[in-house]
Amino acid sequence: MSDKQLILVVDDDPDLVDMISTKLEANNYRIAKAYDGLQAWEQIRQEKPALVILDVMMPKKDGYVTCIEIKNDPNYKDIAVVLLTAVVDNLPTTSYTHHEGRTTPADDFIPKPIDLDKLMDIVRENLMR
């Protein structure tokens, strides 16, 4: 087994998944990929990543719901979750985001378009916690 930490990248835009994955691999992380919340859960159950980079707006199951499910599951609640969002007008000042009146217990967030260097900082910070 590799000592590289596994990161799951989840977004319905395959080009964005590939771009983020390439940057993470270049920084010595292992990568798993998913393109919606249902696929994300399959990967989480199979591989139990150290961190999930999770888009908010996706088909089948959105990132907010997926994040809540991860954090409410005793087997997976310790997985760090970083939400990707194109909605930047109400980004939180804490590690919690609000959507449809619900609090989402994400560990961090990053706005789109993604600054890959900032994303790497966020990944490193969340993996050290």
Image (spheres, rainbow, N blue to C red):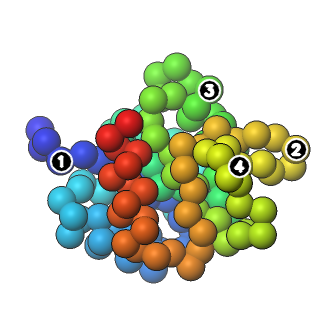
Give x and y (percent) for residue 117. Answer: 37, 72
In which quadrant of the rendered image does the C terminus lie? top left
In which quadrant of the rendered image does the N terminus lie? top left
Residue pictured at 48% horizontal, 55% vertical: 53
Question: Is any part of residue 48 visible from this angle?
Answer: yes
**Mark 1 or mark 3: whose residue is earlier in sequence:** 1
Q: Which residue is mark 2?
A: 101
Q: Which residue is mark 4?
A: 97
Q: Are marks 1 and 4 in contact (CB under 8 Å)?
A: no
Residue pictured at 46% horizontal, 22% vertical: 75
| Image position of 2 (left or right of 54) | left
Q: Amino acid at mark 3?
A: Asn
**Mark 2 or mark 3: whose residue is earlier in sequence:** 3
Task: Return the mark for residue 4.
Answer: 1
Give x and y (percent) for residue 61. Answer: 68, 51
How packed mark 1 is, by other alpha carbons closer than 10 Å (few <14, some 14-19, many 20 or more), is: few
Of discs 1 and 4, which sits in the foreground? Answer: 4
Q: Amino acid at mark 4?
A: Thr
